[in-house]
Image (spheres, helix red, strand yellow):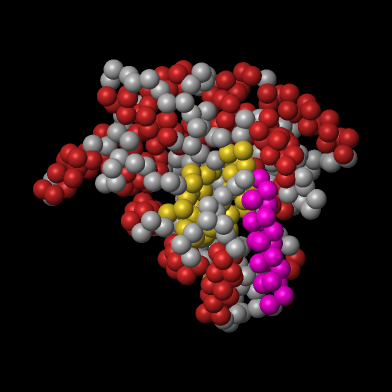
Amino acid sequence: MPRPCEPSSDPQTERILSTLDQFRIETPSWGYADTGTRFGKFHQPAAALDLGDKLADAGQVHRLTGCCPTVAVHVLWDFPAGTDAAEVVRQAGAHGISIGSINPNLFQDQQYKLGSFGNPDPSVQRAALQHCLDSIAIARAVGSRFLSLWFADGTNYPGQDNIRARKQRFTDALRQIHERLSDEEELLIEYKPFEPAFYQTDIADWGMAYLLAKSAGPQAKVLVDTGHHYQAQNIEQIVAWLLDEQMLGGFHFNDRRYADDDLTLGSIDPYQVFRIFHEIHGYAFDHGGVLPEIAYMIDQSHNLKPKLEAMIQTVMVAQELFAKAALVDHAALSVLQSRGDIVAAERVLQRAFMTDVTAALVIWRRRQGLPDDPLEALRSSGYIEQAARDRMQRRAALGIHQSSSYA
Ligand code: AFD
Ligand code: MN
Ligand code: MN
């Protein structure tokens, strides 16, 4: 947890500093490795080759930004059978971070061709359930409290399977997982409208994720991936409803121009990200000024942008927009709203969004002993060049040849 700052003279700066003190965002292990798209992979010399590299990179991001103390892991990619969980915890600690959410992989294995929990074959459903239970065991071994579930499950053609039967399979399986959770653990259920399923996805929107979470049990919540919405959807309204129901478990942050494009947060619509954060600050205002416990997580794995630069860029954007959203004067806003003064109410948000918080961010960073500009600090640190040299040597020794072959 970043160290709280000493008070500053200017109330607005003080508000920003105390907000930044509370803001942490998790980076994804998969964001440091070459992953590519279904049309090919463009290898990066400094891309992480194994979990050790990912932990080092995540540690570097936290060292430079001061707000990324945890890293999300993907079970199959990061915890192959026989992984020594205690050693992973030690390595993460050596880099100043710890393991965050555990992401089971329920979409890559050949057996999941017709789905995991939604698969019509009970033996595949059982295998998927076992993988989740194994993932809970990993969570306990590494001290994580979040099991973050995304399912590629769905069908590609009308009539392929019974939609209601698939819904029931998910309901049953999620209830069984929930029963195995300890009191501190939380199940995050992510939704996505389409891809890789193109006729119907079993957990396609926030309503389906909400209903499945409610039926699973009190420790199941909804995970909002900001890229997983159709163009016209009002994401901040979904966030407001989930907050009001205390069912917002967390976010996967990225941006989209068309669909689940995993673009950099705020690169297409920063005002929408601000409005999402505004709903969270508004909820806090109505609840004693206390920000709700939400797992803020990045979900990106850039194919073109350099991995570490892209990660730090996202973190800096998230901090900036979260700080801007903290500047909304909710007392004044609610008076204007009650009067129906539309333009003045709108201007309260616009003024906050247009406020330059750069200077306050620098004050916060200096007081944390961090570089004024983490991205520039990364670029001038030589870390990327050293990682590239090291990892290229190891690639050569492992005989890993780089081709942008189809994944
Ligand atoms: C893909 C999926 C989903 C999931 C992520 C990590 O669309 O967002 O959370 O992979 O498994 O982006
Ligand atoms: Mn996601
Ligand atoms: Mn996604």
Is 179 in front, or is 301?
Answer: 179
Q: Residue at x 83, y 33 (%)?
A: 394
Residue 131 belongs to the span the image colors magenta: yes
- Whole-percent x, y for residue 247 in the image: 41, 57
Does 127 sit above or below residue 369? below
Res 343 visible? no
Q: Residue at x 36, y 59 (%)?
A: 245
- Whole-percent x, y for residue 26 in the image: 54, 40
**Left or right of residue 16: residue 26:** right
Can you name the residue that lies furthest to the left here? 339
Res 325 visible? yes
Q: Give the main secondary structure of the magenta stretch.
A: helix
Q: Residue at x 58, y 26 (%)?
A: 63
Tally of marks: 0
Does 401 sit above or below residue 370? below
Residue 299 belongs to the span the image colors magenta: no
Is 94 in front, or is 179?
Answer: 179
Is 207 in front, or is 188?
Answer: 188
**Left or right of residue 365: residue 240:** left
Can you name the residue that lies furthest to the front here? 183
- Whole-percent x, y for residue 36 in the image: 67, 47
Residue 289 occupies which quadrant of the picture?
Answer: top left
Q: Residue at x 40, y 40 (%)?
A: 270
- Whole-percent x, y for residue 137 in the image: 67, 55
Residue 9 occupies which quadrant of the picture?
Answer: top left
Is 375 in front, or is 88?
Answer: 88
Specify the segment rendered in magenta.
122-142
